[in-house]
């Protein structure tokens, strides 16, 4: 059975105290009121220096890429097993502790600093990374990763209807997305769509991604949807009507138009990033359930 080290247990206790003091008193407002989670999440980042750590990692990565060093693979980092364990713990402990009381906050956080930034960091040019990724990693801005559409179901690519029509060095974007985490509040949105290609069946068209900013002409973000739960993770719809963008907003730039399956593979890789944190979320929820059930178990034994 895995056991936290002494230093990791100290971190866990510090995060747990933060959650109990800053989040637990507001759970009802987060889940049943109209309190977005981002202010509290930014306070979490500031309290534990997470924004500064993100800035340092980002600067190191960008400097290496500018020097021509290969991008670090997932799971990389220090070769020291203990250091790698501490890095993993620093990521997993906040997820576990947040999910003991308010798992929706982890979804909102993960989509912004995880999915959205990961898409830009993995497929974007250096200029695009510097323009958008750092603000997402530090929570200075909120991100959304928009792939799901009203008619697509689990067939995200085959059922996708959102489109990009190329006109010289610009693109005209149209379409709609639904069930988009952070959609109502996102400052930066990665919009995934199909490139219009003459003579190519709709299902087989190239998948491309664009980075959009809140308030662009023709880009509408709905208010939060009324869901059955997890209102601490605001979810909404996006509508694009003739949104005109330049090549600078196409993730990967001109090179993204060359690879036939690059857009699909990139989106699949981003999905894997999301799924890797689900186990930690489940652990936090299970731990809290066992705590709540413990008094009942004790009384039944008496």
Image: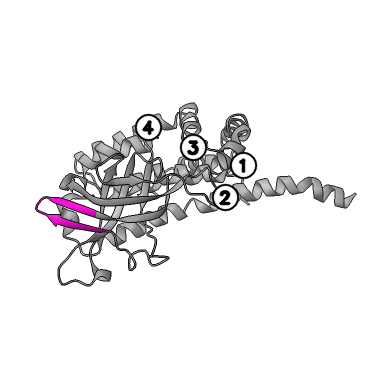
In this picture, is 136 found above or below 196? above
Magenta region: which residues? 163-173
Q: Earlier in the sequence, mark 2 or mark 1?
A: 1
- Point 87% across, 51% down: residue: 301
Q: Earlier in the sequence, mark 2 or mark 3?
A: 3
Which residue is the site of mark 4?
Answer: 140
Real-space Cα separation, disc 2 to disc 4, in angstroms: 26 Å
Q: What label does residue 36 carry, if any? A: 3
| Location of residue 32 in the rendering, given as x and y in whole percent from the top left corner | 58, 42
Left or right: 240 as drawn, with respect to 50:
left
- Mark closer to the observer (2, 1): 2
Q: Are marks 2 and 3 in contact (CB under 8 Å)?
A: no
Q: Residues within 10 Å of mark 3 (few under 14, many from 20)?
A: many
Residue 165 located within the stretch drawn in magenta: yes
Q: Residues within 10 Å of mark 1 (few under 14, many from 20)?
A: some
Left or right: 282 as drawn, with respect to 184:
right
Q: What label does residue 173 carry, if any? A: none
Real-space Cα separation, disc 2 to disc 1, in angstroms: 13 Å
Real-space Cα separation, disc 4 to disc 1, in angstroms: 24 Å
Q: Nearer the viewer, residue 286 or 79?
A: 286
Which residue is the site of mark 1?
Answer: 101
Q: Secondary structure at mark 4?
A: loop
Residue 112 located within the stretch drawn in magenta: no
Left or right: 38 as drawn, with respect to 124:
right
- Point 37% across, 38% down: residue: 137
- Point 49% across, 50% down: residue: 277
Q: Main secondary structure of the magenta part?
A: strand
Q: Earlier in the sequence, mark 3 or mark 4?
A: 3
Look at the image and tell me whether residue 1 can be seen: yes
């Amino acid at each position: 059975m895995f056991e936290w080290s002494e230093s990791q247990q100290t971190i866990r206790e510090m995060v747990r105290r933060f959650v109990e003091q800053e989040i637990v008193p507001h759970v009802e407002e987060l889940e049943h009121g109209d309190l977005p989670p981002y202010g509290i999440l930014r306070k979490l980042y500031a309290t534990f220096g997470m924004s500064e750590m993100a800035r340092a990692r980002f600067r190191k990565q960008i400097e290496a890429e500018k020097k021509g060093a290969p991008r670090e693979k997932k799971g990389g980092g220090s070769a020291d097993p203990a250091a790698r364990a501490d890095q993993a713990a620093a990521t997993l402990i906040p997820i576990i502790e947040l999910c003991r009381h308010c798992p929706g906050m982890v979804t909102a956080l993960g989509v912004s600093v995880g999915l959205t930034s990961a898409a830009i960091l993995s497929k974007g040019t250096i200029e695009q990374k510097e323009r958008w990724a750092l603000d997402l990693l530090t929570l200075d801005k909120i991100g959304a990763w928009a792939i799901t559409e009203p008619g697509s179901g689990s067939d995200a690519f085959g059922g996708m209807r959102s489109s990009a029509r190329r006109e010289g060095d610009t693109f005209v974007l149209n379409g709609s997305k639904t069930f988009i985490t952070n959609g109502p509040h996102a400052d930066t949105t990665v919009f995934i769509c199909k490139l219009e290609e003459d003579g190519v069946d709709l299902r087989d068209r190239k998948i491309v991604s664009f980075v959009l900013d809140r308030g662009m002409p023709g880009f509408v973000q709905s208010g939060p949807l009324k869901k059955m739960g997890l209102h601490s993770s605001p979810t909404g719809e996006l509508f694009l009507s003739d949104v005109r963008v330049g090549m600078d907003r196409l993730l990967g730039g001109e090179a993204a138009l060359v690879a036939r399956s690059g857009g699909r593979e990139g989106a699949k890789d981003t999905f894997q990033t999301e799924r890797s944190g689900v186990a930690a979320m489940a652990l936090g929820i299970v731990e809290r359930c066992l705590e709540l059930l413990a008094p009942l178990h004790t009384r039944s034994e008496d």
